[in-house]
Amino acid sequence: MIEIVGVSLKKGGKIYFFAPNGLNLKKGENVIVKTERGLQFGIIETENTKIEENKLKASLSEVIRICSKKDREVNEKNIIDSKKALKKCKDLVEKYELNMMILDANYTFDRTQLLFTFLADNRVDFRKLAKDLAAIYKTRIELRQVGVRDKAKEIGGYGSCGRPLCCSKFLCDFDSVSINMAKNQNIALNPTKINGACGRLLCCLKYEDECYKEYSKNLPKVGKKVETKFGEGKVISVDVLKQKYRVDVKDYGIVEVDVNESN
């Protein structure tokens, strides 16, 4: 067994897991953690928990310390300076007439890196922009191009289910989602119903897709002619979860067939 804590690097952000480093941490506490980008300011989201080591997908970084008053002051200054850097970067993008939209800017806690994320339809030559930013801020500059799904992940928000966006809370990778997944679940193909905050198909359409495929094996396709105890008819609708389908029988009417009873 190994001990872990869940930490978000911004309010309402995705939870990452770290080794508590002997600290007994409480939810809501501010901590400094070690990441591949350098030291970061974080918030404890889940307290010390033990899990089996084989469940870890990667090695754990450590919580360095619980934040002091000075650490919180440094973090506040970093946030203010990041906002100023964001405005400056947008001004330079406009100056150089670059076809890119700057979304966000973030200093690491130790200010060893300043990360800018941006949207762009095509590849952008931002070498001049990066050079100017490095000269101004005297730290390592990273400009990272993201897609619209990444934008939703960065910004966060709530889905139609009323819960925080999956991408901003726990999804590590974006799996491919197809329109057939919505069809398999008999969801109306209305963009307002099947698209997420990013404008792309909802990631959650994939969660239960295998289950719907398995349950659908026992059901006939809509439009297929089937035999019932009332005669032959055409299937007009199916209910995958209830394992029932409705058939329009000529000279009789619409009847409901339960797959479990007919077997």
Image: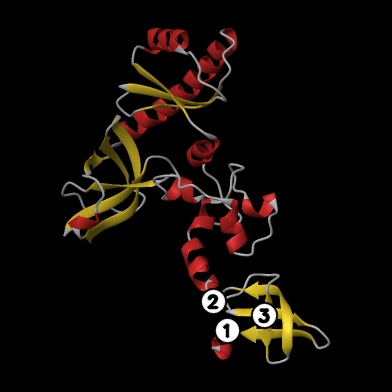
First in sequence: mark 3 or mark 1?
3
Residue 67 appears anywhere in the view: no
Q: Residue 66 location in percent, x, y? A: 26, 42
Task: Give the residue pinned by disc 2.
Answer: 218
Q: Residue 109 location in percent, x, y? A: 32, 29
Real-space Cα separation, disc 3 to disc 2, in angstroms: 13 Å
Q: Vertically, is 36 above or below 142?
A: below
Q: Amino acid at mark 2?
A: Asn
The numbered mark at residue 259 is 1
Mark 1: few/some/many CA within 10 Å (<14, 14-19, 20+) = some
The numbered mark at residue 230 is none
Mark 3: few/some/many CA within 10 Å (<14, 14-19, 20+) = some
Frontmost of labels 3 and 2 is 3
Classify residue 125 as left or right of residue 256.
left
The numbered mark at residue 226 is 3
Q: Amino acid at mark 3?
A: Val
Real-space Cα separation, disc 2 to disc 1, in angstroms: 7 Å
Q: Residue 223 location in percent, x, y? A: 71, 70
Mark 2 vs 1: CB contact within 8 A = yes
Callout 2: helix, strand or loop? loop
Quadrant of the frame with the N terminus: bottom left
